[in-house]
Amino acid sequence: MPLLAVIALIFLDGNSFGLSVKDETAMSLGYNSISMTSMSYDSGTPVARTLTISNDYFLPRKVEIPRVVGCLSDKEGISAWAALRVTYIEESPPYGTKEPIDIPDSDYYNPSSRLFVEVPAHGEKRVSILVRVYDYFDKTTYGDYDEVLLFEANPQGRYFDSYTYCQDLDGTSLEKAVHIPITKQ
C-alpha cells in the first residue's frame, strides 16, 4: 500500500495540476536602458519578459524556465544583428528580494542544459528576463536598432552560441520571435 501512495505522488508531481503561468512581455524597451553596460537589477535594466508561476498544489513544484536568446534588429538592415546579454531574476512574494538565477559557464553553451525554479506549495514565483548589451557594445556606433527580438532557444543538440544564433536567423525564426519595439530616449 505505501508503494502505491509513493507511485501516486510521483505521478501527480509530474503533471501540471494546480500550476499556472502568466507570461507578460514588455510593450517597448528604452534604447538607453538596453545600452547600459553595467547590470544592476534595481537601476533600470529593462525587463523584457516576466513569468509569474502559481502553484495551488499541496507539494512544491520544480518548473522549467525557457532559455531565451535576445537579439537587436534593425528593420532597415543598416546595422548587423547583435546579440543581447540575457539574465534571469527570481523573486518570491512580497517581491522585494531579487536573486539572479545563475547559469554555470559550463552549462551556458550546453544546448541540453535547462533552467528550473522551485515554486513552494500554495505559493508563487516570478521570473524576470532582463536584456542588455554586452560590455563591448558602442551605442554611438550602433544606434540604428529598432527592436529587440526574443526567441526561445532551440539549439537542437548543437553548440549554442547567441552570436551565431542572431546571425543565422531565418524567416521561420523571425515569425516565432517576440518583437519588442525600442523607444529612442
Image (cartoon, helix red, strand yellow):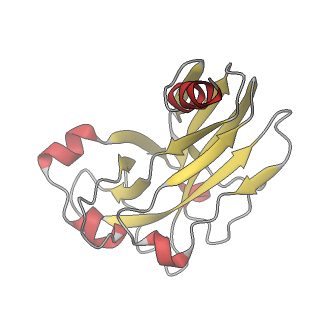
* Left or right side of 172 for 70: right
Nearer the observer, 117 or 81: 117
Which of the two residues, 44 or 57, is positioned nearer the viewer here?
57
Q: Measuring 29% from the left and 53% from the top, which residue is drawn there?
A: 154
Instruction: Decide if residue 47 is on the left or right side of residue 161.
Output: right
In what quadrant of the picture does the N terminus appear? Answer: top right
Residue at (55% x, 64% y) in the render: 35
Rendering coords of residue 147 (x, y %): 38, 48
Residue extending furthest toward the bottom: 136
Q: Residue at x 57, y 30 (%)?
A: 13
Please, which residue is most extreme toward the left here? Answer: 171
Q: Is residue 177 left or right of residue 92?
A: left
Q: Is residue 137 above or below residue 50?
A: below
Circle count? 0
Q: Is residue 79 visible?
A: no
- Determine the residue positioned at 60% across, 28% down: 9
Residue 143 vertical placement versus 56 (above, below): below
> In the rendered image of this protein, does residue 111 appear above or below residue 67?
below
The answer to whether one can see residue 164 in this image is: yes
Q: Nearer the viewer, residue 58 or 82?
A: 58
Query: Which x, y percent locates residue 54?
Result: 66, 25
Residue 124 point in image, percent of width and height: 72, 30
Q: Residue furthest front?
A: 1
Q: Nearer the viewer, residue 126 or 10?
A: 10
167 vs 33: above or below: below
Give the side of residue 135 with respect to residue 84, left or right.
right
**Quadrant in the rendering for residue 36:** bottom right
